[in-house]
Amino acid sequence: MLRAACIVCRGVINQHPVKGNKLPRQSLYVHRHHYSYPRPPVRYYSGLSRLPLRRSKLLSLNTAYQTQRNFWVARLASKLLKLRYLVLGSAVGGGYTAKKTFDQWKDMFPDLGEYKWIIPDFIWELDEHINFDKLSKALPDSEELAKLLPDFDKIGESFSFVKSWLSSGSDSAFKATDSQNFDGSEKQYKKVSDKEKVDQLQEELLQTQLKYQRILERLEKENKDLRKLMLLKDDKGIHQRKVKKSLIDLYSEVLDILSDYDANYNTQDHLPRVIVVGDQSAGKTSVLEMIAQARIFPRGSGEMMTRSPVKVTLSEGPHHVAMFKDSSREFDLTKESDLAALRDEIEVRMRKSVKNGQTVSPETISLSVKGPGIQRMVLVDLPGVISTVTSGMAPDTKETIFSISKAYMQNPNAIILCIQDGSVDAERSIVTDLVSQMDPQGRRTIFVLTKVDLAEKNVTSPNRIQQIIEGKLFPMKALGYFAVVTGKGNNNESIDSIKDYEEEFFQGSSLLKKGMLKAHQVTTKNLSLAVSDCFWKMVRASVEQQADAFKATRFNLETEWKNNYPRLRELDRNELFEKAKNEILDEVISLTQVTPKHWEEILQRTLWERVSTHVIENIYLPAAQTLNSGTFNTTVDIKLKQWTDKQLPHKAVEVAWETLQEEFSRFMTEQKGKEHDDIFDKLKEAVKEESIKRHKWNEQAEDSLRVIQHNALEDRSISDKQQWDAAIHFMEDTLQSRLKDTESVIRDMVGPGWKERWISWISRTPEQNIRNETQNELEKMLKVNEDHPAYLASDEVTTVRKNLETRGIEVDPVLIKDTWHQVFRKHFLRSALGHCNLCRRGFYYYQRHFVDSELECNDVVLFWRIQRMLAITANTLRQQLTNTEVRRLEKNVKEILEDFAEDCDKKVNLLTGKRVQLAEDLKKVREIQEKLEAFIEALHQEK
């Protein structure tokens, strides 16, 4: 076009020769356009550039003309030299000017590198498949193309003819016509007021903006469909763009780790997030749903629905799905059933996070939403700010919501999305004061006015909406102001219907027509683009600084670990739990390595300790009071049968279970030298207690044990002398043990003897003196009648009391009977021990069934039966332990450890200490730093 225009100009110039070194004004006007474009320095033209350059010839000259000729030649040479410098200077200056102009134009163009991802990869790979050199050679050259252009010289001649015709006779006609038109137009112009012109221009501007807005939306929709196809056609050579998808996911993972990190060492989480705050029922959740393009949050009519912070990670993907951080289930957001299930799940998680007696919770619910055309960012929806605590709420609900909101907004890199309900008075808003406190300069706040359709209908003064949008109605400042429509108030509206209603409203809204709002300040689409752009700018500006801060924190933690625990591995809480779990399972398995002899000895000894009192008091002593052996055996058989049917099997199972507990506790608590780690003691104790609580002995064990014990007690046949001696030894040990216990009880009753009183300088109490006198009186009675029965008759009690009264001692009959019980028990046990010594040689009489013998040793047979029953019971219980109960205990321990592994609070309570906390901090800081470095690398690659 430039070349063609120059030809036209040259034709016009040729028609008008130069007069007085001046060109016609029309020609200069045309040429002005061409010289406004920068030209390469090598294409500059001058008046001498068209002269043909010829080689000078040397002529023979006369001497008379020598001086004149030399002067002319020197003058010509000097002019040529000046011309050369002028040309050279012009070329250099023109080149510099052209380069500067080119750089200015280049800076004016936007940087399209960030939008390179819009063009598919196969476009950039076309040069590998198409030979552009061959294609350029096949096209016609510039000379052939010039032949196809029209003859611009003839066009110039035509322009000259028209100009000459206009400058001659037709001037008067045109002047007359112009004067008439001018008079009419002046009258018409007076009729058109300035206000109508302004309205007309605003209407044209609005229509133009809406036109380009629709074109932009159409192109974005086409782009979204194309990108969806590209992501789905992985098997056709168009690979998925995992960079952008994984970029936001990686950033979200960093935020999830930081939310659980206890910020020690002055390292705080300053990574950007979009914090959505607003008054209750202001429409902030609806705005977030419009950005996410799905109705994903539970809703109610006026009641508080957002009870805990919800972190939503928005990213692009081929399918519109949602997923929780701790779950693998995907919710298809295009299906209404999945949307309902997602809303129910969010509500259930919110209610679970709220503790008893509270209304809101600071625990964060992490959710990711992916879909075609969704802007990538991380938003946190906070509970709505309230002004009054209503019935059913905790008293501190208002303060808790304020503290949660401030905790998120105090992050200097957090983007505050302040949601204001446009349908209510701005003076009733609470969130604006809160936001202005956290961000006084408004450098990271984006103000959003919702329900603008209701505001336009209800507000009498439209200027009030403009004042709200511009932030003039209250002192809050913001980075940007937006107005959106979140639907008609129907909870069943779809996202598409809300978008259509929003676009239809703003097309006819007077707010846009009167210039109160600009086109880029309306619709949720523009809001989403602006928030995403601000979010990524903030991320790029702060992420490296945050990575450096965590790098310094990691160095401090590693140094502290090396100084305090130089010989220990850095095991965090989960790794320590796994180590403790293996140790506990090894100790449970160690129970199977206990020898059968050890089990039976422990069981037999423990069982006899539990039942010995019953055997002596309820079986042996009553039977020993009988007059003959037949009555003795009958009494013993009856009492043994009753004992076996009711108490003995259950008591034996209790003993076995307690023995298993003791052995298990011994293995769990005993220290293993240098390998013992006391950090596991609390966990092992909790596992032991929980195992004991859950474990139940096999119910069928008592039935089978009852039969075995009954058969063992019915056997009276002692086969050899060795068993007889073992029974006597068992009886003797038992009686001596009981005798020592009885003597100890009597000593406590009567006080110290005379030797102890003189040596230790202690004396008896009055009650002990009375009991001592009572004991002496009862012993005299036993000396008179060594075969006295076990019970003291009432007349005997009266006799003892009167004898003591004669010595001035008042005694209660109850005291006499209590003292008699212990005195007679001592007398009986001494007599039984003497009889036991006599029966050592009585095995011969036993084999003859005590025929023609005054020695009867039925009590030895009784103790042999008890001893044999204990041995058989211990053997049976040992088999049940090793074959069944130990394995069941191991299974219970595994289940308990699995339950503890899933309960994070339980692990925190059971594995505590500075070492554990330091290892936890080290692990989290390392993980955060690695994630941040990977994110920064991906961010640089995308940029």
Image (cartoon, rainbow, N blue to C red):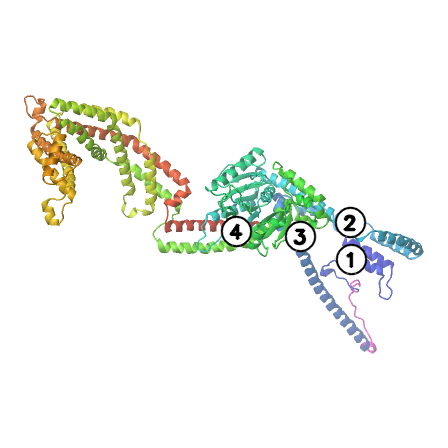
Magenta stretch in the rendered image: 48-66
729 over 513 or under it: above or below? above
> Residue 670: image x %, image y %?
27, 43
Q: Amino acid at mark 3?
A: Gln
Label 1 to label 4: alpha-carbon separation: 61 Å
Compared across the picture, whether 216 is left or right of 923 comes to right
Q: Which label lies toward us, 4 or 2?
A: 4
Q: Amino acid at mark 4?
A: Lys
Label 3 to label 2: alpha-carbon separation: 24 Å
Tell whether position 64 is magenta: yes
Q: Earlier in the sequence, mark 1 or mark 4?
A: 1
Mark 4 highlights which residue? Answer: 406
> Residue 919: image x %, image y %?
40, 50
474 over 838 or under it: above or below? below
Mark 2 highlights which residue? Answer: 200
Q: Earlier in the sequence, mark 4 or mark 3?
A: 4
Mark 3 highlights which residue? Answer: 467
SS for tag 4? Answer: helix
Mark 1 highlights which residue? Answer: 33
